[in-house]
Structures are given as C-alpha cells and as structure tokens.
Amino acid sequence: MNSEKLTLSYEGFGLAIRELAQLIADSGYKPDAILSIARGGFLIGGALGYALGVKNTLAMSVEFYTGENQRLPVPVVLPPIPKVSDFQGLSILIADDVADTGETLKLVQEFVAPHVRQARSAVLYEKPHSVIKPDYSWQKTDKWINFPWSTLPSVSPNS
C-alpha cells in the first residue's frame, strides 16, 4: 500500500456523494433500499439515500479494521444481524466507504445474495487490490484515506 495519505474534507464528501449518486442514477439502477456497512458506510449510505431519494435504509455492522493498516484475520459480523426478511426480494445498494481488501464487501454481498432480487455496491474509494470490484466507485486510489469523521480521536467525558 502506498504510504501517502489522502484526506477527504466534509465539503469534498458532499461533492463526492453527489457524483457517486449521479453515476448510479445514470446507470439506470434504482435500488429499493440501501444497506450501509457500518461504521464507515453509515454516512455514505445515508447520504446516498438522500441523493437518490431512497428512504428505506438498513445497516449491517462488520468489524475488520482495528486501526490504520491493522485488521482482523477475517471480517466479523457484529450483532444485531439484519433480518433477511427486511430486504427479501428487493434491489439493494450496498454502501461502504472503501473497498480496500474487498473482504467486507464480499461478506455482505454473500450474506444478502440468496435473499435479494439484485444487489449492487457503491463505495467512495476503490483500491486496486480489492477482491471485489464495486459496481460504483467515486475514485480509485492505493493511498490510506483520512475521512473527516474518523481522523480525530473519540470524545470522552471531561475529567
């Protein structure tokens, strides 16, 4: 992986979402629901929901990265696990921030595949070594991405 870092601002995020949504709209795909991969995909899925006019949004929590360039051996689905009846027979757009290794996206695609009419994926960033090629991506990069919501440490109560 490239040791350089790419930084996305909140303003840049807004522009990126509009451009990503336009790619999806221009393809003719009209999802019935958006499934965000938490945590990184929460903001992407919600913003795409607004941009595409999709109100049915779901989330699936998957842990893989534990720090910069540090991850678990395999992605792990965290409870609560979505009920497949919530998206049975729907066209789903799976949203995440980055397809880095692609393992998280692959896990979620395999989870929903037997239950949905169709599933496509959208990410802000796609890495060249991802095992899954997302259907839609805003940019391709091999750099580590600093998102505006994840660069500062978590807040804690005042001591």
Image: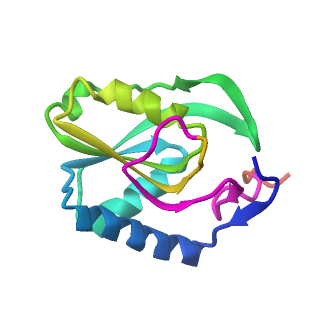
Report the front residue among 37 and 3.
3
> How many tags in the picture?
0
Give the image location of residue 29, x and y in percent: 21, 56
Residue 50 location in percent, x, y?
31, 66
Residues rendered magenta in the picture: 130-153
- The x, y position of residue 81, in whole percent, is 39, 25
Q: Residue at x 76, y 60 (%)?
A: 5
Q: Is residue 17 above or below residue 146?
A: below
The answer to whether residue 137 of the structure is visible from this angle is yes
- Give the vertical position of 115 relative to 144 (above or below): above
Tell me if 69 is positioned left or right of 102 in this view.
right
Q: Quadrant of residue 54?
A: bottom left
User: In this picture, is 104 found above or below 51?
Assistant: above
Instruction: State which quadrant residue 55 falls in.
Output: bottom left
Estimate the x, y position of residue 117 in percent, counting from the top left: 16, 35
The answer to if 37 sits in the magenta stretch is: no
Q: Residue at x 72, y 51 (%)?
A: 154
Residue visible at 82% across and 53% down in the picture: 3
Q: Residue at x 86, y 51 (%)?
A: 159
In which image quadrant can residue 22 be found? Answer: bottom left
Q: Is residue 150 left or right of residue 14?
A: right
Name above or below for residue 47 compared with residue 11. above
Looking at the image, the residue that sits furthest to the right is: 159
The image's colouring method is rainbow
Farthest residue to the front: give it: 128
In this rendering, position of residue 20 left or right of residue 85: right
Does residue 57 appear anywhere in the picture?
A: no
Q: Main secondary structure of the magenta part?
A: loop
